[in-house]
């Protein structure tokens, strides 16, 4: 009898846990935006007349950046506060040196309510490798 009761309780908790997880994931998928990885060619085409954010340090930015990019240092404590000033319903295009920082920055921005964050694959290094213009 004890074994049957324990087994029944275990099954009930498992089913309840699964139902809770399913409802949460449905909500988060509906509320969260999309992170899109773009090749340098796609980034160049789609970012025309859009907001481009270079999330590197000011020193890295001064060494060269994509024309029209705004510099908001990912390592700055106010990073999320600064990016939250942009329209969350419009796509935001971001890049860093090699693509490592944009991965975590994109997730943070989506969690802040941005509908679409476009991430330059391979960062500005890949941009330059593909012979795209860099301004200083």
Image (spheres, rainbow, N blue to C red):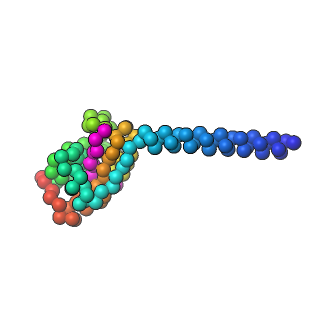
* Residue at (31, 38) in percent of width and height: 88
Q: Is residue 24 shown left or right of residue 114?
A: right
**Foreground: 65 or 11?**
11
Residue furthest left as drawn: 136
Q: Is residue 93 magenta?
A: yes
Q: Which residues are magenta?
A: 89-100
Q: Nearer the viewer, residue 26 or 124?
A: 26
Decide if residue 15 is on the left or right side of residue 49.
Answer: right
Res. 111 image quadrant: top left
Query: Residue at left 71%, top 41%?
Result: 12
Q: Is residue 58 visible?
A: no
Whether residue 132 is visible to the viewer of this picture, yes or no, is yes
Query: Where's residue 106, x and y in %?
Result: 35, 47
Q: Nearer the viewer, residue 64 or 26?
A: 26
Q: Image check: 18 left or right of 58?
A: right
* Image quadrant where one finds the N terminus: top right
- The answer to whether 45 is drawn above or below residue 74 in the figure is below
Question: Going 69% across and 41% down the picture, which residue do you hit?
Answer: 13
Can you say whether 11 is above or below 99 in the image? above
Task: Indicate the position of residue 133 as horizontal and vertical percent values.
Answer: 14, 58
Is residue 22 part of the magenta span, yes or no? no
Residue 89 point in image, percent of width and height: 31, 38
Q: Position of residue 34 (x, y in %)?
A: 37, 47
Number of numbered markers: 0
Q: Residue at x 78, y 45 (%)?
A: 7
Residue found at the very far right of the displayed protein: 1
């Amino acid at each position: 009898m004890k074994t049957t009761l324990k087994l029944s309780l275990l099954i009930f908790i498992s089913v309840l846990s699964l139902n809770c997880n399913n409802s949460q994931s449905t909500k988060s998928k509906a509320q969260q935006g999309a992170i899109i990885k773009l090749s340098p060619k796609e980034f160049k085409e789609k970012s025309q007349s859009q907001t481009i954010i270079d999330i590197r340090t000011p020193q890295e930015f001064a060494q060269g950046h994509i024309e029209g990019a705004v510099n908001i240092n990912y390592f700055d404590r106010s990073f999320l506060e600064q990016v939250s000033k942009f329209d969350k319903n419009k796509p935001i295009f971001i890049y860093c040196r090699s693509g490592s920082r944009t991965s975590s920055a994109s997730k943070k921005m989506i969690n802040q309510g941005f509908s679409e964050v476009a991430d330059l694959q391979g960062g500005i290094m890949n941009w330059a490798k593909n012979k795209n213009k860099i301004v200083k």
